[in-house]
Amino acid sequence: MQSIRFTAPWSRQLKWLTALVALLLLALPSILLSRAPETASALFAVSIWLPPTILALGALFAIRGYEIEGQMLRILRPGWKTRIDLKDLQSAEVKPEAMRGSVRIFGNGGLFGFIGLFRNSTLGRYRAFATDSANCVVLRFPVHTLVVTPDRPEQFIAALNTPTP
């Protein structure tokens, strides 16, 4: 069975947020090390290693793209994939304003992506694997809603609607 791949372009907002947060997470240990006490406590060691660890973990969860193969959607990550079963998909719609006014319930709100659980008045509670809100595709299932942001939203929906052999 052939798979169809889509990239996950980054919005200008995501690029700026990621750059600023990465700079902060790398600057904090440098500043602390420049002011290190003679005998460092365990808390000091944690404060040195925690920011770069957060940055590395954020990078591991970054979204590189999306892949549709039959009744399976794969969210492509660095070195691994998140699998979403599409068999119960009820609808798919291009909706660029879908994430507008969202509040993050749990997840990442701008370091390498907008990933996790969110809520807004339009969609209610939803799960997002997003990098550019201008490319939002809303996938509705019986018990949950999913938002992805492929580079070609219309072709993404066409690929979802293509019958599988």
Image (cartoon, grey):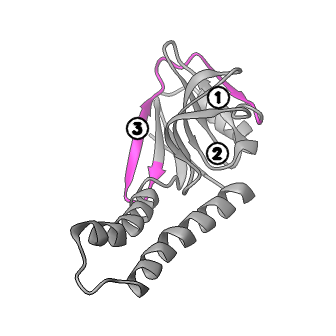
Residue at which label 1 appears: 138
Q: Residue 150 carries which label?
A: 2
Query: Sequence order check: which comes first, mark 3 or mark 1?
Result: 3
**At 69% across and 34% down in the image, what residue appears?**
99
- Closest to the camera, between mark 3 and mark 1, is 1
Q: Residues within 10 Å of mark 1 (few under 14, many from 20)?
A: many
Q: What residue type is labelled 1?
A: Val
Q: Position of residue 157 (x, y in %)?
A: 66, 32
Q: Which amino acid does label 3 sit on?
A: Arg
Residue 47: quadrant of the picture: bottom left
Residue at which label 3 appears: 83
> Start and end of the magenta stretch?
76-96
Q: Is residue 79 visible?
A: yes
Q: Where is residue 106 in the image (x, y as percent from the top left)?
A: 47, 36
In this rendering, position of residue 48 left or right of residue 71: left
Query: Sequence order check: which comes first, mark 2 or mark 3?
Result: 3
Residue 41 in the image: above or below residue 129: below
Instruction: Give the secondary structure at mark 1.
Output: strand
**At 72% across and 56% down in the image, what residue appears?**
13
Q: Nearer the viewer, residue 120 or 132?
A: 120
